[in-house]
Image (tube, rainbow, N blue to C red):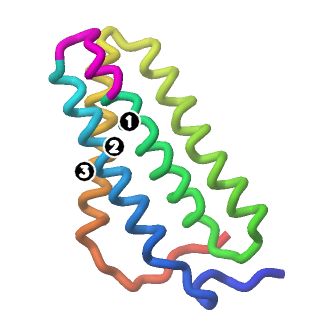
Amino acid sequence: MGRHAEASGTPLDLRRTAQLTGLTGGVAWVVAFFLPDGGRLQGSVLWVGAVLLTVALFDLGLLLVRSDVLALRVFVALALPTLVWGVFGLVHGSAADPGLVDAVFGAIVGLVSAVRLGQHDGVPRATL
């Protein structure tokens, strides 16, 4: 049985990376909302934001499992972005204004990441 990450020392850098990429990706999606529709720049900003948000979700998935069982951590790290993007795709596809859905999603992720980036708590998290 693997030891808990609390004992092995989960790197704070992974948490910071998730927060910074989430913040940057969220801001990119909000900025893309205000760019001219259908422009090449808007598409590029959306893709860069999507990659950053995916990295943030992957990192967050790695942090959700507090054990040294690498297979479990990687499974959750891959499953979390898949689940989030699947739900996002359903909402995005059924919305009257998909650009607004992008901006709201980006704003939520950016705000949550910014708040978490400013917090420094040593409270132990739940383990799986």
Label 2 sits on residue: 25
For the residues bearing labels 3 and 2, Cβ distance under 8 angstroms: no
Residue, far front: 40
Mark in front: 3 vs 1: 1
For disc 2, the neighbor class at 10 Å (few under 14, some 14 to 19, many from 20) is: many
Q: Which mark is residue 81?
A: none
The residue type indicated by label 3 comes to: Leu
Q: Label 1 vs label 2: CA separation?
A: 7 Å
Q: Secondary structure at mark 1?
A: helix
Q: Secondary structure at mark 2?
A: helix
Q: Label 3 vs label 1: CA separation?
A: 18 Å
The residue type indicated by label 1 comes to: Val
- Per the rendered image, the range of residues in magenta is 36-44
Q: Secondary structure at mark 3?
A: helix
State whether residue 3 is above or below residue 23: below
Q: Label 3 vs label 2: CA separation?
A: 11 Å
State whether residue 112 is above or below residue 124: above
For the residues bearing labels 1 and 2, Cβ distance under 8 angstroms: yes
At x 34%, y 20%, the residue is 43
Label 3 sits on residue: 111
For disc 3, the neighbor class at 10 Å (few under 14, some 14 to 19, many from 20) is: some
Label 1 sits on residue: 48
Q: Position of residue 46 (x, y in %)?
A: 35, 28
At x 28%, y 48%, the residue is 110
Front-most of 88 and 34? 34
